[in-house]
Amino acid sequence: MNKNRQIHIEKVAENVRDECNVKDYGFQNIFEAAGKIGYRAIRYPIGNDSFLGFALIKDTERIIFSNSSLILSREIFSVAHEIGHQKLHLSEQGITIIRDDDFNDRDEYEIEANYFAASLLMPIEKVVKFIRLELNNKNSNIWNGLDIARIQTVFNVSYDMVLIRLKSLGIIDDILLDKLKFEKTQQTASKLLRVINGNVDLCKSTEVKKVPVEYLEWVISNYNEKLIPIKSLEAALNYVDLKAEDFENLSEEQAEEESFADLLRGMD
Ligand SMILES: [Zn+2]
């Protein structure tokens, strides 16, 4: 990725922050933010060893899916990464889906989406501002795990991501990075967060099942119009722990068509 492309990506990330009206250091709720800028954000716990997320254009919808079996800070990163794919790589005429099994792929698009996510979640000027105003410009050579945990909490990211970002911004070097990494393995990030009264939830998975209400309405109306069989309706509702009986006025006849359940199944 050349310098011009990096700057372009930083600008796109900054526009997303503006659009989402992010005034703090980090996103308070990136899932809501994704919805605010026009994406259908779907969260579902598909297991620790499953894929991390995908970005998809389906008909007129732009969808972002994240695996909520991951610890929250990683799921937040996934959403930021998928927003990157939506903004930078997907188009109605070109690629309409990118699925991520991991984020270590050295493919150009993956490097760009990671760069976008880092710029979106931890913009350079915000990192510098935090170090100056909140860490009182403390010399990075005497930083410890607690300082990293503080940065982690305000930016709502993982401990590891803070280290990677600080390293890539040239704020810490390899020696310090290894020292701070070692401190984490000694203490674990959640203990560090607890000490500073930080957001311990970042280290747990949420297992959230969040499907936009429009999808449920869409599935139910498809069913009512006899476009999908009751089994598809049940499968779709099952994703969010609902049952067909929970809804009134559902008709009973059936026909074949796509549903949210098939959409997800297609990703396996
Ligand atoms: Zn990706």
Image (spheres, rainbow, N blue to C red):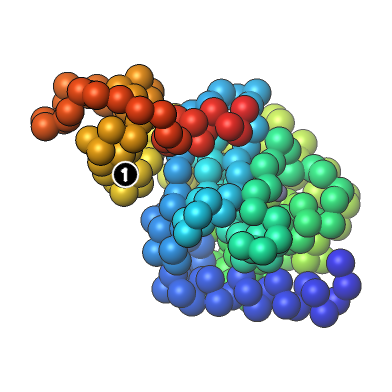
How many circles with numbers are drawn on the protein? 1
Q: Nearer the viewer, residue 237 or 105?
A: 237
Crowding near the residue tagged with mark 1, few <14, some 14–19, many ≥20 C-alpha atoms within 10 Å: few
At x 60%, y 41%, the residue is 53
Looking at the rendered structure, the secondary structure element under dot 1 is: helix
Q: Is residue 224 left or right of residue 10?
A: left
Q: Is residue 264 left or right of residue 219?
A: right
Q: Can residue 156 be seen here?
A: no
Q: Can residue 164 be seen here?
A: yes
Q: Quadrant of residue 191?
A: top right
- Residue 13 percent coordinates (x, y): 61, 70
Q: Quadrant of residue 11?
A: bottom right
- Residue 67 percent coordinates (x, y): 54, 35
The type of residue carrying mark 1 is Trp
At x 65%, y 23%, the residue is 49
Question: 4 above or below 212?
Answer: below
Residue holding disc 1: 218
- Residue 112 percent coordinates (x, y): 76, 61
Q: For the N terminus, which image quadrant?
A: bottom right
Q: Is residue 15 left or right of residue 2?
A: left
Q: Nearer the viewer, residue 194 or 136?
A: 194
At x 54%, y 28%, the residue is 265
Question: 235 above or below 146?
Answer: above
